[in-house]
Image (spheres, grey):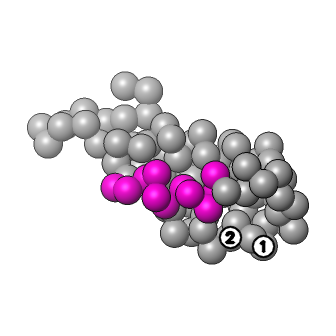
Amino acid sequence: LLGFMVSQKGIEMDPSKAKAIIEMSPPTNLKELRSLQGRIQSIRRFISNLAMRCEPFNHLLRKESNLNGGMNVKPHSKRSR
């Protein structure tokens, strides 16, 4: 099912999908940040407190901040994973 695995335990996330997100380089611009957020949203059912964890990303989007080569979002992107 589109990136999910169905087993006797129920619906689980496809490990390759998680690996792709974990191995992404930190976003360096707003387009890349939105792309990361979209990938994270696609697996939101498997992440507790996702809204709270993504708040730093949302703050950057509201402020139209300069991402300084990813330095500002790197700590947050690792925490969301």
Residue drawn where x is 87% and y is 61% of the image:
66
Determine if the magenta segment contains residue 53.
yes
* The magenta stretch spans residue 45: no
The residue carrying mark 1 is 71
Q: Is residue 38 above or below residue 15?
A: above
Across and down, in percent, residue 39 comes to 57, 42
Most foreground residue, 24 or 75 = 75
| Real-space Cα separation, disc 1 to disc 2, in angstroms | 5 Å
How far from the left and from the top, in percent, is residue 12?
Answer: 29, 42
Q: In the rendered structure, which amino acid carries the disc numbered 1?
A: Met
Does 18 sit above or below residue 2? below
- Classify mark 2: helix, strand or loop: helix
Are the residues tagged 1 and 2 within 8 Å (C-beta)?
yes
Residue that lies at the very extreme toward the top in this rendered image = 1
Instruction: Left or right? Give the position of 53 relative to 56.
Output: left
Residue that badge 2 annotates: 74
Q: Does residue 31 show up? A: yes
> Majority secondary structure of the magenta segment?
helix
At a point 80% along the width and 43% down the height, the residue shown is 31
Q: Can residue 23 be seen in this view?
A: no
| Nearer the observer, 7 or 81 | 81
Q: Residue at x 44, y 27 (%)?
A: 2
Query: How many marks on residues?
Result: 2
Q: How crowded is mark 1: few (under 14 residues within 10 Å), some or many (20 or more)?
A: few
Q: Which region is colored magenta?
A: 48-58
Give amino acid for label 2.
Lys
Displayed quadrant of residue 63: bottom right
* Residue positioned 37% across, 35% down in the render: 4
